[in-house]
Amino acid sequence: MNKSKLFIYLFLVLLFLVVRASAQSADSLLNTLDNSKKFNKVESTFKATHIVLSHSTETQKKHDLDLRIRHHFGDIGGEFGSAHTLYGLDVATDLFIGLDYGVSDKLTVGIGRSKHDELFDLYIKQKLIQQQKDGGLPFNLTFLAQVGLVAREPFAATEFVNYSDRLTYLIQPIISRKFSSRISLQVMPSYLSRSVSAEPNDPNNLFSVGFAGRFKLTKRLSFVADYTLINGLSRKDNLVTPLYNPLGVGLEIETGGHIFSLNFMNSEFITENNFIANTKKSWSDGGVRFGFTISRNFSLFKSKNKDPNTKSTIY
């Protein structure tokens, strides 16, 4: 069995196990609790399904569809920035348009497309554990499995010799905790696999650990940040072209059914398949760039839930 088929097989097996475990967990909980209020869940650890670059532990509510548009501009400073590019606004390094759909309150499937590499992204996101109050479960656990497909034409005859060279795979458990009404923190160990890498000394399989947080400033305004540690874990220090750990900070603004984020980050790229492996810019040399995210949530079916305590609070 070749590498591509092996990872597809593992992806499907993990998918089955996650869904099955979630269903069994839900059945067990329902058998021991009289109603949803006794479940005593902690809601809205994060206000959106994404933070700056990274996914959060949040999933879409059942039958909710999220239209997400993300944009990264060019370098603010350095050789490729300054006033000559209007501090990066003349340049778009990446643009992403995607749809996330809530199959259930805890299971989300998503698809999107990035400008860079014409990358199509398909993922499944399953919430396995939800934080509880009053001595219950102390954290959230969500599992993310993602596949990326590079759709662009090859730059050379030797590129994409095998179709599997176009594919990347990401597996990521996401653990978060809401410490108070204002502060939420998250950690994200990840495994990214690809058949080829742009940097010859960079391994095809990368382990990384991400960290993220949210600090609520006002009722509708929050400060968010995330950082992914790759160098020093599975990446060597003898690269021909330097690669950096992605760091992003931003302001998250809630406006009813919309979430609008204003972000600054050193990664040129948007999806995990690209920003974990290929961040070539640094905050210290002017490689920081401005970006924004617009998220609009749609309910495809009219909800029968009239209880304000259990309705969706992500938006």
Image (cartoon, rainbow, N blue to C red):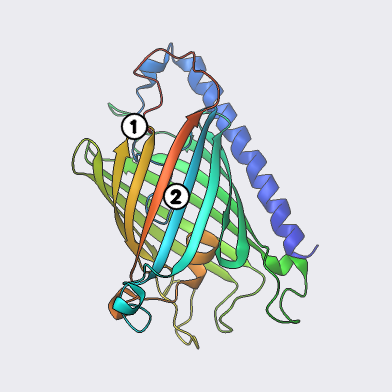
Q: Which residue is drawn at 49% across and 85% down?
A: 239
Give the mark nearest the N terminus, 2 or 1: 2
The residue indicated by pointer 2 is 55
User: For the residues carrying marks 2 and 1, which lies nearer the camera in this image?
Assistant: 1
Q: Where residue 256 appears, x then y in whole percent? A: 34, 32
Q: Residue at x 50, y 36 (%)?
A: 128
Q: Where residue 242 appears, x then y in whole percent? A: 44, 83
Q: Distance between the residues labelled 2 and 1?
A: 21 Å
Q: Quadrant of the N terminus?
A: bottom right
Callout 1: helix, strand or loop? loop
Count neighbours of disc 2 (C-alpha within 10 A) and say few if under 14, some if 14 to 19, many if 20 or more.
Answer: many
Q: What amino acid type should be assigned to the residue bearing mark 2?
A: His
**Eyeballing the image, is 29 above or below 280?**
above
**Eyeballing the image, is 60 above or below 227?**
above
Callout 2: helix, strand or loop? loop
Count neighbours of disc 1 (C-alpha within 10 A) and say few if under 14, some if 14 to 19, many if 20 or more.
Answer: few
Q: What amino acid type should be assigned to the residue bearing mark 1?
A: Gly
